Amino acid sequence: MTTRYRVEYALKTHRRDQFIEWIKGLLAVPFVLHSQPTGVFESRTGTVAQMAEEAHRRYAEIMQDVEDMIDDHIAHQKVGLHSQSKLKLLVPTIGEFFTRLPLADAFRYQDRKRFISSRRFVPPSFNDIRLILNTAQLMGLINAGGVDLATFDGDVTLYEDGKCLEPTNPVIQRIINLMSHGTKIGIVTAAGYTEAEKYYGRLYGLLEAIKESTILSPSQKENIVIMGGESNFLFKYDPTSPYLLAHLHRRSWILPSMSTWNQQTITNLLDLAEVSLRECVANLSLPASILRKERAVGIIPSEPGYRFPRESLEETVLNVQKKLEMSEVGKLLPFCAFNGGNDVFVDIGDKSWGVCVCQKYFGGSASTVDEGGSIRGDRTLHVGDQFLSAGSNDFKARVVGTTAWIASPAETVELLDELGAMMGAKKELAAGKE
Ligand code: IMP
Ligand code: MG
């Protein structure tokens, strides 16, 4: 019973994205009906081109239907009835949409790139749909007015897990290009350090490139902050500071609702997290050291080069998260327990707060703000790699802005190229109309 519960509940439901799985299921039907695997050895079934054309038409129709259903969900959202939309009934985990998602167009774009409709044996996959959703999100943002704030996770999104953003990283030029269009940038990472030097060590390639850039004006260069420890330490780019970063005191940037996070509650939450991490280390016999910080506690390998089994990392995250959720202190403070690939951390706050702080920080100089003076969610894009509902940290950003789910630093570069092309096309169109 226990084992079955664990497999079904913990490892399956939480390791799947319900919305993506649902779309995958819808596309599986035309795949089964129209793909022609026998075409590999017999000619009666028509050419690949004919099959691809038919599959393409059917897939696009389905994506259009889903797009219409999202429009209906947004209409419900606007009058406070999103829990009654048809989409909500079909996909109970669905949240808020900040922009429309032109899924049919996004599908056509990705089909040209990935030849989804030409496949006879492999149906539209999780990754196909994830990338279609990313493209649709970029299209939605551009149609709604553009990206005023782009926030990026660090590990896996900008650089390989545990590595640094080196000067040769192709993402640097893409970020500078975005900044040259007036977009503000936040690096919203779980990596929690109090010293500028540590962040410089992780991000020096980007910081030095901004300093040397001739395409950015001095004021555009100011448009980047680093939000560390999910939502705990804020640094701004400053060419006159050592390591090009100036630490900003918490009292100068915290949101009013963060002022209740007092030291005693923080200590209590981290104490409890530490106890349950220690229990997991003992129960799973992990060669791990506990790392306690000002605003976080985690486990890291105690032997250099050791890699924790994936199952142990997941078990630890789900255990700690449950224990904190059930506790009194867990109800007083937001926290984020996540699997960092080869470590597990519990941080105070989460990336929804981190992105919110960036929205507020840059709100004063943005053209479109909400009533609180912050950059709006429909003008914000958070790019990250951790979007599963349990044990992931980027997932939390979904409640404050639009998101793109990438799987590697190379995908981030591709995404930014896509965005750059869309921004360029929009500019050309606007110039043509003048
Ligand atoms: P991210 O992908 O940029 O959010 O970075 C996550 C990684 O930062 C984790 O997997 C850890 O290896 C590392 N890290 C360093 N310090 C901290 C901390 O205080 N909290 C959480 N993660 C940390
Ligand atoms: Mg990451």
Image: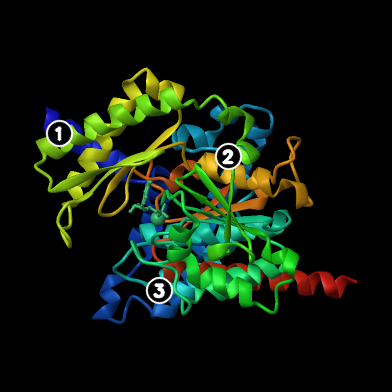
Give, as a three-letter code, the residue at label 3: Ser
Residue 257 percent across, percent down from the top left: 59, 28
Whether residue 308 is situated above or below residue 118 in the rendered picture: above
Q: Nearer the viewer, residue 330 or 55?
A: 330
Whether residue 271 is situated above or below residue 248 in the rendered picture: above
Residue 288 percent across, percent down from the top left: 17, 47
Q: Nearer the viewer, mark 3 or mark 1?
A: 1
Residue 191 percent across, percent down from the top left: 41, 52
Q: Which mark is residue 250?
A: 2
Left or right of 363? Residue 87 is: left
Q: Is disc 2 surrounded by few (<14), some (14 to 19) or many (20+) residues within 10 Å? A: few
> In the rendered image, which quarter is residue 102 located in?
bottom right
Q: Residue at x 64, y 49 (%)?
A: 100
Q: Which residue is mark 1?
A: 4
Q: Is disc 1 surrounded by few (<14), some (14 to 19) or many (20+) residues within 10 Å? A: few
Q: Are marks 3 and 2 in contact (CB under 8 Å)?
A: no
